[in-house]
């Protein structure tokens, strides 16, 4: 009785504004786990990136602070710049190809019969669903030097000699293989997202455009693309971020073939100095640089999602 | 008109060819898993699994290391799912049903953490877990996984909670329910699909994760399935690989995931691209 009586004057909006402890209690568990799993390691890493880890530290001596020495030595090391250049080039190439192929498939899905569309969608879903590690073993098998299906099929093309071609033996072909695999895994997400975006473009708008005399290509470029631009932008940004973190793919390709520094991208590079050489200072400095890079790239995405949260 | 039909027909044919190429690796995994190693040793690939058997699969399962890795993967995934859902659900309720100071900072933190690559933190996480004596431990890995998965789960569940109109709860409160009671009796049941979808998402992440597991689980006896599967490829660098077994092992790791994934895919895409696509 008392509750019903008090309800009218305490409107819900007011109740929400009233300072209540409830929301804070609700977010405490998530904040705790984030502090332990992400926050503390980030801070530790920042601090450690200013410390020196040499031979003495492997025998238990505390690491001294050395200022920005780790950063300085990284940024003056041509090997590190090589890794950064390769990572960015790989990321750029993978993201661009993925977007173009994804966009192409999305447009294609609109033009074809239901049966063909369903076949294509099921096949893309299956590829998308493959766990990364399983996909890597299959692709390694497909690209196998001696009995791989890819060398066999390519060798069948007249004039092409791919007999026992070792794809993983030189950095160029190594990264071509990595590119094929990463694009294969990433295209489905892009294709489905853009296809979902395309289906929002209304028939009326397209009809109006064709009445005004716009050809197929013109309609796509001048009418459809501007409408789906937000989707493409978000998908592109996610691709760039995801294609910077290809540690699993590169590690497993290195397992199957060569593993020198010229086959490294940022992830495997950090892994090697951190766990192999036990140089936690330099590894942390490199990680901090990668973190800054990622946060810089993702900032725009985060702002976009924030707007959605506020609406 | 007939030219248009012809164009449509040839595009459909093209789409089917692309579909076949795209699905080929998945097919190749299953095909090779069924073939005996003798057949795979031939220099001419066998494109159809005639004369195949389940022998490879049986051999992989019979080997003790698969069961150990399966046990590790399942326990980690279950812990991550349960803890993640519980924590993320509470946080999602907080940010979609309350306006409070610090809310925006929390949302920003959630969104940013979700973007951080494992490669940029794993050395620090390794040192932290080594310091706590939690290397090779299910708990250690689960903590890191949960922290990595909670942000996206919060974001995904936020959408679900916000999708249930507050007015429904208010109606319940007018009928004499307390605020918590109204939430639990009215909104919570409507969230079931969201909770299931986020649970499956968390499961997929934990099951597939490789990078952090590689650093935090150094002993072979404590390997999860992805690390166990990697062992086959590592071995292939030095000796003749039994590709039939590797593919059988990959199939065992992949099939449950493919099934789960098909189930949750729609929800995941919606969460990632957010308002840019209204389903």
Image (cartoon, rainbow, N blue to C red):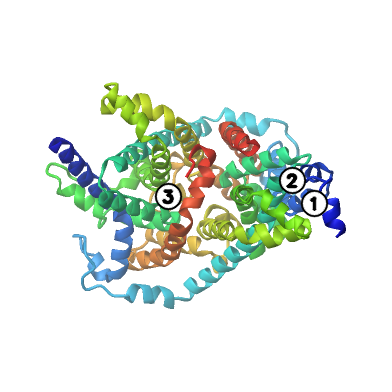
Quadrant containing the N terminus of chain A in the rendered view: bottom right
Q: Left of B37 or right of it: where is B208?
A: right
Q: CA distance from mark 1 to mark 2?
A: 9 Å
Marking on residue B35: none
Marking on residue A254: 3
Marking on residue A22: 1
For image coordinates 60% across by 46% down, the residue present is A274
Do marks 2 and 3 share a subunit? no
Task: List x then y, in percent, for residue A225.
Answer: 39, 29
Q: Are marks 1 and 3 in contact (CB under 8 Å)?
A: no
Q: Which residue is mark 2?
A: B98
Of mark 1 and mark 3, the one earlier in the sequence is 1
Front residue of B170/B39: it is B170
Task: List x then y, in percent, for residue A188.
Answer: 39, 46
Which mark lies nearer to you, 2 or 3?
2
- Circle 3 marks a residue in which chain? A
Q: Secondary structure at mark 3?
A: helix
Front residue of B252/B85: it is B85
Q: Secondary structure at mark 1?
A: helix
Do marks 1 and 2 share a subunit? no
Q: Left of B278 or right of it: where is A66?
A: right
- Residue B102: image quadrant is top right
Quadrant containing the C terminus of chain A in the rendered view: top right
Do marks 1 and 3 share a subunit? yes
For image coordinates 37% across by 65% down, the residue present is B246
For image coordinates 66% across by 46% down, the residue present is A55
Which mark lies nearer to you, 1 or 3?
1
- Residue A3: image quadrant is bottom right
């Amino acid at each position: 009785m008392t509750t019903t009586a008090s309800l009218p004057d305490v409107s819900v909006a007011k109740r929400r504004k009233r300072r209540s402890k409830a929301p804070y209690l609700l977010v405490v568990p998530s904040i705790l786990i984030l502090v332990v799993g992400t926050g503390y390691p980030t801070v530790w890493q920042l601090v450690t990136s200013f410390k020196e880890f040499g031979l003495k530290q492997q025998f238990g001596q505390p690491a001294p602070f050395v200022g920005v020495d780790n950063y300085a030595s990284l940024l003056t090391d041509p090997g590190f710049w090589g890794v950064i250049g390769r990572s960015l080039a790989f990321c750029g190439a993978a993201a661009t190809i993925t977007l173009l192929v994804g966009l192409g498939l999305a447009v294609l899905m609109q033009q074809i019969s239901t049966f063909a569309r369903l076949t294509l969608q099921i096949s893309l879903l299956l590829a998308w669903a493959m766990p990364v590690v399983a996909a890597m073993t299959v692709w390694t098998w497909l690209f196998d030097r001696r009995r791989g299906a890819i060398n066999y099929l390519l060798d069948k093309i007249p004039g092409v000699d791919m007999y026992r071609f070792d794809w993983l033996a030189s950095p160029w072909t190594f990264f071509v293989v990595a590119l094929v695999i990463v694009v294969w895994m990433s295209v489905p997400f892009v294709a489905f997202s853009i296809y979902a975006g395309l289906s929002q473009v209304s028939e009326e708008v397209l009809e109006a455009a064709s009445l005004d005399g716009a050809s197929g290509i013109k309609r796509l470029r001048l009418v459809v693309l501007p409408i789906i631009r937000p989707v493409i932008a978000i998908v592109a940004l996610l691709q760039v971020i995801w294609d910077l973190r290809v540690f699993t793919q590169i590690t497993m390709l290195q397992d199957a073939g060569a593993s020198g520094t010229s086959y490294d991208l940022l992830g495997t590079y950090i892994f090697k100095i951190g766990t192999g050489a036990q140089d936690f200072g330099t590894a942390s400095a490199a990680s901090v640089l990668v973190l800054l890079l990622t946060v810089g790239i993702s900032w725009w995405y985060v702002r976009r999602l924030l707007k959605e949260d506020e609406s | 008109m007939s030219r248009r039909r012809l164009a449509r027909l040839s595009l459909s044919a093209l789409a089917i060819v692309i579909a076949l190429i795209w699905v080929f690796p998945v097919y190749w995994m299953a095909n090779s898993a069924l073939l005996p190693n003798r057949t795979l040793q031939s220099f001419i690939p066998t494109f159809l699994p005639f004369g195949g058997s389940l022998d490879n699969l049986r051999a992989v399962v019979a080997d003790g290391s698969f069961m150990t890795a399966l046990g590790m993967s399942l326990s980690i995934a279950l812990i991550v799912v349960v803890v993640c859902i519980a924590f993320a659900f509470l946080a999602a309720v907080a940010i979609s049903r309350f306006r409070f100071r610090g809310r925006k900072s929390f949302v920003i933190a959630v969104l940013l953490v979700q973007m951080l690559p494992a490669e940029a933190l794993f050395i620090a996480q390794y040192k932290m877990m080594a310091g706590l004596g939690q290397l090779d431990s299910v708990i250690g890995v689960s903590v890191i996984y949960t922290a990595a998965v909670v942000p996206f789960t919060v974001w995904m569940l936020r959408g679900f909670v916000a999708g249930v109109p507050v007015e429904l709860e208010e109606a319940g409160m007018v009928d004499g329910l307390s605020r918590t009671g109204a939430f639990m009796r009215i909104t919570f049941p409507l969230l079931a699909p969201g909770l299931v979808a986020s649970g499956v998402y968390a499961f997929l992440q934990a099951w597939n994760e490789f990078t952090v597991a590689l650093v935090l689980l150094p002993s072979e006896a404590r390997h999860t399935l992805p690390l166990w599967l990697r062992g086959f490829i590592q071995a292939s660098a030095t000796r003749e690989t039994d590709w039939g077994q590797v593919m059988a092992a990959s199939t065992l790791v992949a099939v449950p995931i493919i099934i789960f994934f098909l189930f949750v895919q729609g929800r995941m895409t919606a969460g990632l691209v957010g308002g840019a696509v209204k389903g």
